Amino acid sequence: MRVGNQIPDLNGIEERLSTLQQEMLVGIALGESLSNVMSTFCRSVEALAPGAICSVVGVDDGGRMNFIAGPSLPDHYPAALTGIRIGPNVGSCGTAIFTRKPVEVRDIEADPLWGPYTSLAIPYGLHACWSSPIMASDGRVLGAFALYFREKRGSNQVERRITAECLNVCVIAIENSEARARLNSLAFFDPLTGLGNRATLKNRLTMILQRAAELQRPVAIYHIDVAEFRAVNDLHGRIIGDMVLVKVAQLLRSFAKDCDLIVRMGGDEFLIVKSAANEEFDAEEFAQDIVHGVYGRHRLERGEEIMIDVRVGVANFPNDGRDHDDLLEHAETALSRAKRNGRGYAKFEQQMDLEKRMRRALERDIGLAIERDEFSIVFQPQVDAKSGVVGAFEALLRWNHPELGAIPPVQFIPIAEANGAIHAIGAFVLQRACEKASEWNEKLRVAVNVSAAQIVRSDFVQLVADVLSATKLEPGRLEIEVTESLFIQDLANASTTLRRLKRLGVSVAMDDFGTGYSSLSTLRAFPFDRIKVDRSFVSDMVNNSDAAAIVNSVIGLGRAMGLCVVAEGVESHEQVAMLRLIGCHEIQGYLFGKPLPAENYADIMRPRHGNRSDGRSAVV
Ligand code: C2E
Ligand code: CA
Ligand code: CA
């Protein structure tokens, strides 16, 4: 029966089909959505095959159909069809996909294949349907391409020709869209944990905040970091490291069920966004839940048991910030605080922001401080414990910031170390200190503090040699003070450099002795000339017998190794008495002299004729 069917000649069809194909490929290449491309496609097919109503359906891994396009089908079709499971008697499309063969139903009402589904079509005047499976290049069935007719009839030759061609276009379009979806999921999901990633966060957080602002509801942001994760990786390897991350992701998912968003930020960092469900929202309570929920020994996939612990930083919307960037930054700031405290979680406080801003300002300005002449050097005497004679001055750096005033070295040295400014600054201190010392009484040494970062640079020994020759300071009058941190990373390299320094004639002191954790082994690794017992022990020794015992044993050890022992931070006569008693060689501290500009010690540094030419300190 070909009632009312105008049949275009096959030659004309070929040309129009190839134009159609081209248009579709362009649409696909331009990244139009599958349903848009396919809707346009259906309309073009309908124009080529008058009397046919065209549609395309897809199928998921579970065998359920989903509606892709069918612009001329009745409005209820997409919803009615989507979710129907394919099978041997599931209309034309469900059966075609299931049997992987074309299914031609000439009379929907009468055909048993349509059974319960006739009500989808008959009331809307659809009486026949010819459906062909869309087969992927790898043999999978991707869906079905169908032509519906308003008459009870089969397909004609032209329609069959069109269908054969259209199936190819459908394969390309659907495979392309699948590939795009895979790429998309790679772009938005972390493949290891299956959680969203930074891109997801960026997309979603702004929307979550907008909605929260409309509803006037608070939102809490939890930035989570796995404690000691690097140690897990180093100790157990990356595979175990990855399993730990998967475990953490599982745990977070399990107690963050009703959260808006959980993402992996990369590395061992995660982020949870939680909107307040009601008035009594307590952001800190949930932070505690996270910490307690994760803390403990956990069994991993392969049976290993590992201790897992996390730190959490919390920032609240709208109190701690109103936009995406501020909130994330503040949650991270709070996290740094939690890490520094070595404790569960920390809530963002405005004060932390001030500290961070201050740090940023210092980071920005420290590189310019030398040329702006903001640095100066002060000197603190080291005296002989018995005679009180000054034997040396320690050079200590001072930074007078134009807006922030005097910045203590404990604050700016770590910044300079972190951003590399320490190299220029260190060279400056060395140059200035040696310059000054070259003007002093020949017996006085100058002690210069040097950061580990400076020493591990290959040109450090050369720098020292150059400064010595430029300032004409005898090498024996320069002492370099290093801390134990130098030996933690690369002991062999550090001791090689120090040995080269000693060969120049320069002496080397171990600073802050007792505060590191490998004190004895570092002492054995390198022949120091001096050890400086840290101020913390000296200040405690009068009232604390443990501290006194430590100072006592360090001094005993130093003496046994033939080293000179200096006590730092000596502030009282009682301390001096005790130190003398236990045989400390030298003493440094406010009691004998604070760190002051060289002019203040001019009398000791350059005694005028006949006046205290022995360098005896006026203080003792
Ligand atoms: P440090 O080398 O242990 O220096 C001794 C610190 O103790 C100095 O603090 C000094 O002012 C302080 N001090 C000395 N006697 C007493 C005392 O009796 N009581 C108390 N309470 N404190 C005393 P400052 O100058 O703030 O330096 C702190 C640290 O900064 C130094 O510790 C050193 O590690 C570092 N530093 C200072 N200048 C430089 C430098 O030019 N280069 C490098 N790399 N580090 C430096
Ligand atoms: Ca020092
Ligand atoms: Ca020290």
Image: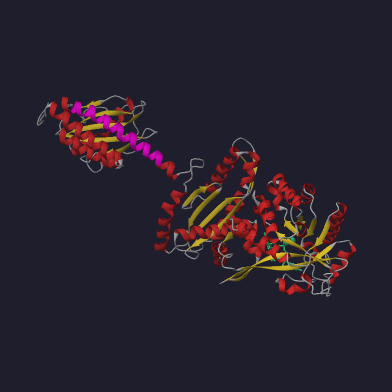
State the quadrant of the C terminus: bottom right
Q: Is residue 84 visible?
A: no
Q: Residue furthest right?
A: 581
Q: Which one is in front, 418 or 392?
A: 392
Colouring convention used in this rendered image of the protein:
secondary structure
Please report the bounds of the magenta region as a residue range.
159-183
Q: Quadrant of residue 243?
A: top right
State the quadrant of the N terminus: top left
* Position of residue 61 in the picture relative to residue 222 (left or right): left
In reply to whether residue 586 is colored magenta, the answer given is: no
In reply to whether residue 172 is colored magenta, the answer given is: yes
Q: Main secondary structure of the magenta part?
A: helix
Q: Which one is in front, 304 or 30?
A: 30
In the displayed structure, 308 sits above or below 412; it is: above
Q: Quadrant of residue 471?
A: bottom right
In the image, what residue occupies the spot 79% across and 53% down?
528
Q: Which one is in front, 177 or 589?
A: 589
In the displayed structure, 33 sits above or below 545; it is: above
Residue 513 in percent (x, y) is at: 77, 57
In the image, what residue occupies the spot 16% across and 33% down?
48
Q: Quadrant of ligand 3?
A: bottom right
Residue 222 in percent (x, y) is at: 53, 55
Q: Is residue 323 visible?
A: yes
Residue 385 in percent (x, y) is at: 86, 65
Q: Which one is in front, 106 or 46?
A: 46
